[in-house]
């Protein structure tokens, strides 16, 4: 039996139910320059709840690229949360970017950081992150990444994480909805902890099982 | 060295010791000199000495063992960052740090923490730096400052503090503190509540700038730690440092270089819009950022060698900084050359008669250096190298010429240089004399010229020096002459190039601002009500009441001024040196703006003081220097502890500043006739002569260079009464083989050297010289930095159909009134088109 070549592409007119309806491919066989992204997305589609599996890098994978590609993926998927937030988070009710009531954060996506409303912070930060991660200057290649650029990832993580925190503390219902579909916050938390991009003191959303007490101390 | 004979001078202690002393002095040179000069000379010397002694005793100044470097030691550079008024803030920073740590539930000393714990502390602090409330931010950044200072609270010795400060600086960078701090710095520059309060209050004090000072301090400490390279650094550190340097050298996310933002702060400060900006820290940081990104003198040397090699030129024969390090200072006022030579080679050396000594030594030395440079024995009879000189070549000379002494290769500190145009001039003159007609642009044919001329030619050729600037100028001419066939290749984005492009839009303002600050920091400047107040960040909120505290404040204020002067001078010098290497027209652009902003009189004003006193000033309280002020038992502040300066006989920063300023002046004036005339007009000679009293070879060399440039304009009288200075110039400054700098006709030579040819015709027209240079520089800037200026070189679209097909959006105002336009501009205008074809109209 001759096997028709598999075309991994969503043709125009594909029904939503049939999206990505192709068999998985082994990482070793992916030969495009975007293999890492392809691999991560494949793992996410297979089971978004299998956080550890998704975050396990293939052998001999460059760590910088791995972190970079994951962060890209987070930012892309976070747009889903941002869309949900646009329904519930209004600039006149959430005038400031807060997580717990204690801290108000500046929006760093501007020439000079300034105070934006929560939803603007979300949009600006995601835009800023997309700009940075796609910038030719810092990330000219997706195969190897300069060390000086890897250091940029930490601050992107920190800024992006605040979106989760805001959603969790102020729009719990939206957050839960989103989290049950994507497990994104859990994955993100595991990710930043695993690669030391943030410390557990900064991770104030009690999403991991062993993180539960953190909520009390923060509140 | 040669002051022995003068020590017996009484009272006034003038270095020459008066004519009688001179006669007694054991040096044979002095005796010979006196004998030849006769009585009128003696009287002159006595008069001169009286003048000299009026300036105070100078003989007791020991030779400074100052070694010029890019910066002082790390410890001192760090301690100069803080003013004494900031002392209470050290404890405050520590307090905020302990609060932050205990908030995290950590109860460990910083050195005992694990690397992960330290990272955790830092990351949580960095998170808080981005908070919206100013107080929260300030608390977090203060804690970070404490960490970058090395967490001295848990340590005991300055060495420990130093090593932790280094480790922490690396850790800070690893945790991504740099971009966050720069972001927040931009925020504080732009907004900040301080200006309102500062403008309202009449006196700005240290409290108005706390946010900025903390941020700038952290950045400064990081840069300063990264700047210091040690051989023992692990490769990890080297990698981090390289990444750090690269990041600082690249534009930030805002598209602006950090150095440019900082220069922007200086110019905003000078415009009066932000009187609370802590200038000292801004300038120190600017300097160190430039030093790190552009590179210090080692890097400059490497770049120069590489650039010269790329242009097909040999490396420069010697490095000024290196060479002056091994030179000895002349005693003030400079000793005659014989004594100097005696001191070096021993007094038994046979002497010429007075009239020939100066020239003879110089010539011998010249021969020697050529001997060293050349392998063949041919140059033994090269004495006839100078045109117009009587033939002195040894074999044919009747006068008993002694054996050429062995000079151990250090007879003349510099290899003499010859400009290509000197050779042209030399050939033209010789041909006119021996052949009788001119040969333009022909350096090769030597027909009809006698042997001595050929030999002279040979010597000149051997010393021919082509500077990188000439190559760049020629290349630039080539590009503008044939923009399409020989266009500019892609400009390499070196750090200097990036910096220049970044500075270009506001470059004049930056230069003016830097000079304004320098003026305010000059020790001779009087505080005027309208001048800028650079001391805002030393003044405490409450003025001191006790004598002791006002003494402390007085020292602090002077120290602040010195540090600012040091930073500004270093920034300017670095800029000039790097831009000159990058492209000479960038250098000319900056220097022209400096000259227009009155840099030359300003620097002269700076030296119009007792320079000796300035370089030995002691404006420091070592007990209050960081880290001593926070470590160990604190001494009570008494008038004795105030007196306890460091043990150095000179003030490093002031010597450094003086040398920098002299170098800047040299850079500005070299080969620029109009600017040399400014030196003359502003009566720089006596000022510069006074600063020769500082016994430091490098400083004297740069001063003598400045004097050499203008000697021929100072007149016979000046030369006569300053022969010692002239001799010092002979012995210390590089010779230009055919340059008649001291006695030359002042109308001929300058244009002869200037590399703008058209100025030659009217060398007395100084403005024309500047204008010609200006237009070249402007052309270069327009060509390289605003590509739209080249549009006129693009082919013009002459096809009627395509021109008419170009969509053109007319403005609504035009659309509404087009009838009137048509009436006025088309129908009523009568154009005599026939004129076009008349002969002569279009050439």
Image (cartoon, coloured by chain):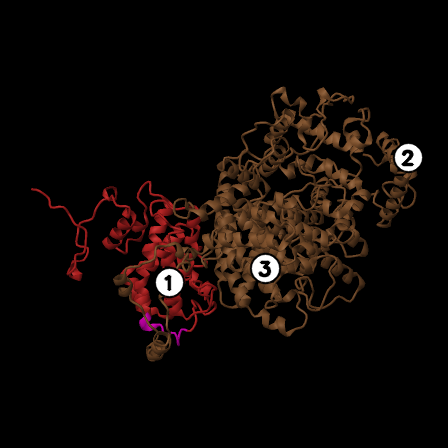
Which quarter of the image is occupied by the N terminus of chain B?
Answer: top right
Task: Report the number of numbered marks.
Answer: 3
Residue corresponding to mark 2: B23
On whether disc 1 and disc 3 are found on a single subunit, the reply is yes
Q: Residue at x 54, y 30 (%)?
A: B444
* Position in image of residue A164 (x %, y %): 37, 63
What label does residue B836 carry, if any? Answer: 1
Which quarter of the image is occupied by the C terminus of chain B?
Answer: bottom left
* Position in image of residue A110 (x %, y %): 44, 64
User: Which of marks 2 and 1 precedes in the sequence?
Assistant: 2
Element under label 2? helix
Q: Quadrant of residue B824?
A: bottom left
Asked if the stretch drawn in magenta spans residue B279, the answer is: no
Tell me the CA gap for discs 1 and 3.
71 Å
- Report the span colored magenta: A86-94
Q: Return the chain for callout 1.
A: B
């Amino acid at each position: 039996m001759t096997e028709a070549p598999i075309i991994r592409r969503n043709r125009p007119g594909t029904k939503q139910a049939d999206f990505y309806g192709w068999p998985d491919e082994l990482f070793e066989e992916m030969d495009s320059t975007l293999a890492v992204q392809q691999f991560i997305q494949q793992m996410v589609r297979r089971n978004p709840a299998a956080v550890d599996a998704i975050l396990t890098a293939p052998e001999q994978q460059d760590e910088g690229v791995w972190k970079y590609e994951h962060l890209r993926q987070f930012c892309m998927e976070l747009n889903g949360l941002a869309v949900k937030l646009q329904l519930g988070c209004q600039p006149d009710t959430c005038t400031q970017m807060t997580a717990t009531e204690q801290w108000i954060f500046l929006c760093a996506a501007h020439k000079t950081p300034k105070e934006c409303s929560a939803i603007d912070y979300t949009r600006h930060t995601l835009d800023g992150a997309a700009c940075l991660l796609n910038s030719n200057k810092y990330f000219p290649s997706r195969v190897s990444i300069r060390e000086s650029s890897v250091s940029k990832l930490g601050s992107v993580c920190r800024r992006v994480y605040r979106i989760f925190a805001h959603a969790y503390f102020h729009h719990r219902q939206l957050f839960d909805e989103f989290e049950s579909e994507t497990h994104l916050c859990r994955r993100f938390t595991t990710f930043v902890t695993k690669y030391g991009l943030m410390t557990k003191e900064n991770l104030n959303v009690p999403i991991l099982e062993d993180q539960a007490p953190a909520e009390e101390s923060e509140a | 060295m040669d002051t022995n004979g003068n020590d017996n001078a009484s009272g006034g202690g003038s270095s020459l010791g008066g004519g009688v002393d001179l006669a007694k002095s054991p040096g044979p040179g002095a005796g010979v000199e006196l004998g030849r000069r006769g009585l009128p000379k003696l009287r002159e010397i006595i008069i001169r000495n009286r003048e000299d002694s009026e300036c105070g005793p100078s003989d007791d100044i020991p030779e400074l063992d100052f070694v010029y470097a890019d910066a002082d030691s790390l410890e001192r550079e760090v301690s100069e960052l803080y003013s004494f008024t900031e002392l209470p803030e050290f404890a405050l920073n520590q307090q905020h740090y302990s609060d932050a740590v205990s908030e995290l539930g950590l109860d460990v000393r910083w050195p005992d923490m694990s690397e992960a714990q330290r990272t955790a502390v830092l990351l949580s602090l960095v998170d808080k730096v981005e908070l919206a409330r100013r107080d929260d931010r300030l608390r977090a950044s203060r804690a970070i400052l404490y960490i970058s200072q090395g967490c001295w609270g848990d340590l005991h010795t300055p060495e420990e503090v130093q090593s932790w400060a280094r480790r922490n600086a690396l850790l800070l960078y690893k945790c991504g503190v740099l971009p966050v701090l720069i972001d927040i710095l931009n925020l504080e520059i732009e907004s900040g509540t301080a200006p309102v309060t500062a403008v309202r209050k009449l006196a700005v004090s240290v409290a108005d700038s706390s946010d900025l000072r903390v941020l700038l301090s952290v950045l400064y400490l990081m840069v300063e730690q990264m700047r210091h390279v040690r051989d023992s650094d692990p490769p990890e550190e080297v990698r981090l440092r390289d990444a750090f340097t690269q990041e600082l050298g690249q534009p930030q996310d805002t598209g602006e270089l950090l150095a440019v933002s900082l220069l922007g702060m200086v110019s905003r400060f000078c415009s009066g819009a932000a009187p609370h900006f802590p200038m000292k820290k801004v300038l120190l940081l600017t300097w160190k950022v430039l030093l790190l990104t552009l590179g210090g003198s080692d890097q400059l040397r490497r770049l120069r060698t590489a650039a010269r090699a790329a242009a097909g030129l040999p490396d420069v024969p010697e490095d000024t900084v290196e060479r002056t390090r091994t030179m000895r200072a002349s005693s003030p006022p400079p000793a005659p050359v014989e004594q100097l030579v005696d001191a070096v080679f021993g007094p038994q050396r046979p002497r010429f008669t007075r009239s020939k000594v100066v020239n003879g030594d110089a010539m011998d030395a010249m021969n020697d250096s050529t001997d060293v440079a050349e392998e063949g024995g041919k140059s033994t009879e090269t004495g006839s190298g100078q045109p117009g000189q009587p033939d002195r070549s040894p074999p044919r000379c009747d006068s008993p010429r002694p054996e050429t002494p062995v000079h151990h290769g250090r007879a003349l500190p510099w290899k003499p240089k010859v400009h290509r145009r000197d050779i042209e001039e030399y050939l033209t003159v010789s041909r006119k004399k021996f052949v009788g007609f001119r040969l333009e642009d022909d350096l090769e044919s030597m027909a009809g010229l006698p042997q001595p001329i050929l030999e002279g030619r040979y010597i000149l050729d051997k010393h021919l020096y082509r500077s990188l600037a000439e190559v760049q100028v020629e290349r630039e001419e080539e590009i503008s002459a044939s923009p399409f066939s020989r266009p500019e290749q892609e400009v390499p984005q070196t750090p200097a190039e990036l910096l220049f492009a970044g500075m270009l839009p506001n470059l004049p303002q930056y230069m003016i601002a830097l000079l304004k600050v320098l003026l305010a920091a000059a020790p001779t400047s009087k505080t005027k009500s309208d001048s800028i107040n650079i001391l805002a960040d030393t003044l405490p909120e409450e003025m001191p009441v006790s004598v002791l505290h006002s003494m402390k404040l007085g020292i602090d204020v002077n120290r602040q001024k010195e540090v600012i002067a040091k930073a500004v001078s270093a920034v300017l010098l670095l800029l000039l040196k790097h831009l000159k290497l990058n492209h000479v027209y960038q250098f000319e652009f900056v220097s022209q703006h400096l000259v227009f902003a009155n840099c030359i009189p300003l620097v002269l004003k700076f030296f119009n003081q007792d320079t000796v006193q300035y370089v030995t000033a002691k404006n420091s309280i070592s007990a209050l220097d960081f880290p001593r002020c926070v470590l160990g038992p604190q001494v009570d502040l008494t008038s004795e502890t105030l007196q306890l300066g460091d043990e150095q006989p000179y003030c490093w920063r002031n010597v450094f500043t003086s040398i920098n300023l002299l170098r800047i002046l040299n850079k500005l004036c070299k080969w620029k006739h109009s600017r040399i005339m400014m030196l003359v007009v502003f009566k720089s000679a006596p000022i510069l002569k006074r600063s020769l009293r500082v016994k430091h070879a490098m400083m004297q060399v740069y001063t003598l260079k400045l004097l050499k440039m203008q000697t021929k304009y100072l007149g016979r009288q000046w030369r006569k009464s300053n022969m010692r200075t002239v001799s010092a110039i002979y012995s210390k400054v590089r010779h230009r083989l055919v340059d008649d700098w001291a006695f030359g006709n002042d109308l001929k030579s300058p244009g002869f050297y200037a590399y703008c040819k058209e100025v030659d015709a009217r060398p007395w027209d100084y403005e024309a010289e500047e204008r010609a240079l200006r237009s070249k520089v402007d052309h270069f800037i327009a060509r390289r930095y605003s590509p739209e200026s080249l549009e006129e070189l693009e082919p013009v679209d002459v096809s009627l159909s395509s021109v008419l097909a170009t969509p053109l959006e007319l403005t609504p105002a035009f659309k509404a009134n087009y009838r009137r336009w048509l009436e006025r501009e088309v129908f009523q205008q009568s154009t005599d088109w026939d004129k076009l074809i008349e002969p002569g109209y279009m050439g």
